[in-house]
Image: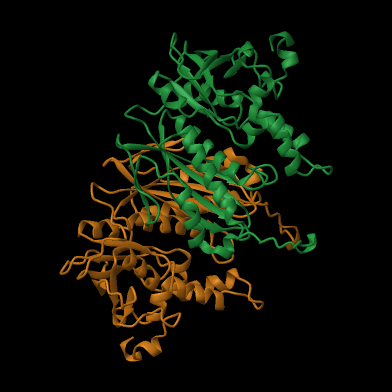
Chain colours: A green, B orange
Amino acid sequence: MEHPATSVDVEPPVTVQGAGELETLARILPRLPRGSRTDLGPGDDAAVVSAPDGRFVVTTDLMVHGPDFRLAWSSPYDLGWKAAASNLADVAAMGAVPTALVVALAVPGETPVADLEALADGLRDACAVMAPGCGVVGGDLSVSATLTIAVTAFGDLEGRRPVTRDGASAGDVVAVSGPLGRAARGLALLFRLGVDHDGAPDAVAAAGLRGRDPDVGWQLAPTPPVADGPLAARAGATAMLDLSDGLALDAGRVARASGVVIDLDSGALGADPTAALSGGEDHSLFATFPPDSLLPGGFRAIGTVRAADPGSPPVTVDGVDPGATGGWDPYRRWSGDRG
Amino acid sequence: MEHPATSVDVEPPVTVQGAGELETLARILPRLPRGSRTDLGPGDDAAVVSAPDGRFVVTTDLMVHGPDFRLAWSSPYDLGWKAAASNLADVAAMGAVPTALVVALAVPGETPVADLEALADGLRDACAVMAPGCGVVGGDLSVSATLTIAVTAFGDLEGRRPVTRDGASAGDVVAVSGPLGRAARGLALLFRLGVDHDGAPDAVAAAGLRGRDPDVGWQLAPTPPVADGPLAARAGATAMLDLSDGLALDAGRVARASGVVIDLDSGALGADPTAALSGGEDHSLFATFPPDSLLPGGFRAIGTVRAADPGSPPVTVDGVDPGATGGWDPYRRWSGDRG
C-alpha cells in the first residue's frame, strides 16, 4: 500500500525538553570516553582525576551560538570536536598531556537529543584523535535560549615546569607546528560562498564548499597538533602558546612577555603570509627553542629571537613591523615571488 | 550655580562592548583571589594548580539567565556569590577542601563593566567566607545574548577517599548540615511578593522583601557549610551529597546508590517539613555516619539507615513514603504539633 506523499508520517525528533535531563544524560554519557586518568567519573557531586605529579593544568573556553559559530555551518558533531580541540590545544601549549575534560552545555529546550549525542561523539572522537586517554569526567546540562558550550580541560605536566609565554631568550629559534591562516581562510570562504542569495549562512552551500576546500573543515573542526605540546616541552621549548588570534598578535604576546624581539621570515609563512600573520583560530602551536635545537614533531622554524631593542617593534617580518600599517600588506612588504 | 533637573549629565556606564575584552579583564582580574594553591594564575594558555595528594576533585555548574536567575532579583554580586557557593558545596560534598575555581562568563555586549566587577567581588567574597585560600585561577569572557556563568571548581581530598553517594550502611546515622527548605521558601516569597502589579519580577519589591526575610537572601546568595564537608570526611562519613533538589529526592539518591533504606524523622526537619523535603537549592550537606559517631561541625541527626527492604520505598518519613502522593503533605502524614 502506498502512502500519498502528503500523509507520510515523520516522527518528530525527541527534544531535550521532551526527554528531560535524566533521559538525555542517559543517552549522552555512554558515548563519552572515560579516560585513563579518571578515578571517579560522572554521577556524583564531583569527579576525581589523578594528577600524578602533584599539580594539574587547567583551562576553560566558551563557545557561544552567534559570535562563535553558526548552526547552518557547524554540525553538532563539529561543535563537540572544536570545543574539545581548542581546549586541548591550550593544555598542550603549556607542555602538558591532556588528561580530562568537563563539559557544561546550555541548550534550547527544543534541541533534539540526537544533536547532543552527535556533540558527544565529536568530543569523544576529538579526544581519541588528539589526546588518547583523555576522558570526559563530568559536566552540566542546562536550558538556555542561546546554545552555549563551556569546556574545561586538564593536563599533566609529567614533572616538567609549565612552558609559559615569558621564557624566550635572544638566539632562540622560533617555530610553529600546525597550519597558519587556514581557519581564517576557511571562515572567509564560508562568509563569501557558504551563504544563500540573501547572504545568510546556508547549510547546503557550506557542505558543498567543505567538500571542495579542506580549509573550511579546519575552521569548523580543527585538528591542532596536541601531541606536539609535550614533545616541545621535552625538547626544551623556552616559551609556547596556542595560536588563536593570528601569528602577528600571538608572537607579540610572547615577545612582550619575554622582553625580546621576534624576527619572522616571510618565506617560512607559506603561500599566503598575510593570512598566516593575521588569521586566528588555527590552534597551531607557537614555540621558541634554544639555538641549534632539533625541532620535535611537526615544528618548523619560522624565525629567530633577538634581544630587546627599544627601537624595534616586538615582532618584525623580514625586518619590518607587520602592524605598522594596521595590517600586513604582502605586496608592499615583500615581493610576490617569495610566496 | 544650579543645574535644572532636566540637564543633569549622567555618564552612561562603560559597557563590556565599549571597554573591550582586554580592559574589561584588566578591571576584573585584580579583584579575584589568587588562592594559596595557585602555581600559575590567569594570563597564559592555562593555569597550574597544585594537587598535593596526586588527585583533584572537579565539578562544573552553569547558571543561565532565565531558568536559573532573574536580574530583577539577583544583583551581579549575588550571581558571583551563588555561582561560587553552589560549586564549592559540590566540592565539599566529596569531602574535599576547595582549592580553586575557573569562571567562564558569556554576557550581553551592553553589560556594564561595573556589573562584572561586582560579580567578581561576589566570587571573591564567597571564597573568602566559605573557602579561604581558594583562588580564581582562570576563566574566559565571551559575548552572548543570554547571560551565562559557568564555574568549574577544584578540591583537594587530603589523602582521603572521596565520600560518594554509595557508601551508606544499615545502622548509619543520617545527618544534615545547613538549612532545609529555606532557598525554596525564599523563591516562593519572591514569586509571590517580589513582583510588580503585573506579576513581573521587580527589583524594589524584591529588595524590600529581602530586608524582611532572610530566606530570600538564602535563595539569592546562599552560604552552604562548605567547611563541614572535609570535617564530615575526617569524621568517617560513609556517604555524602549536596542538597540541591530537595531532601526527599536527594536522600533517595543516596539510598538507591547505597542499596539501603533511609528513614527520616519529621520531628527533626524543622518547622516546615514539607519545604524541607521538597525544597531545592539549599546546598546544605547530607551525610551518613557510622553508628554512635560524634557528628562534626553543624551536622544534626535527622534519621537512620536500615538494610534494603523490597517492600519499602528508598526513603520514608515517620515510616511513610513521602513520594506516595506525589508530594509530601504534612497534615496527612503527621500531626501538626510535631512541627
Q: Is residue A310 visible?
A: no
Residue extending farthest to the right is A197
Residues A205 and B83: in front is: A205
Q: Is residue A140 visible?
A: yes
Examine the rendered structure and indicate whether residue B92 appears above or below residue A62: below
Position of the C terminus of chain A, as image quadrant, is: top right
Residue extending farthest to the left is B292
What x and y, as percent, mark residue A7? 76, 64
What x and y, as percent, mark residue B218? 43, 68
Residues A52 and A43: in front is: A43
Position of the N terminus of chain A, as image quadrant, is: bottom right
Q: On the picture, is A117 further left or further right than B224?
A: right
What x and y, as percent, mark residue A325? 71, 21
Q: Residue at x 52, y 58 (%)?
A: A24
Q: On the picture, is B137 further left or further right than B157?
A: right
Q: On the picture, is A16 further left or further right than B99?
A: right
Q: Quadrant of residue B173?
A: bottom left
Q: Quadrant of residue B23?
A: top right
Examine the rendered structure and indicate whether residue B224 appears above or below residue B322: above
What x and y, as percent, mark residue B15? 64, 48
Examine the rendered structure and indicate whether residue B320 appears above or below residue A2: below
Q: How many marks?
A: 0
Q: Residue at x 26, y 68 (%)?
A: B299
Residues A92 and A213: in front is: A213
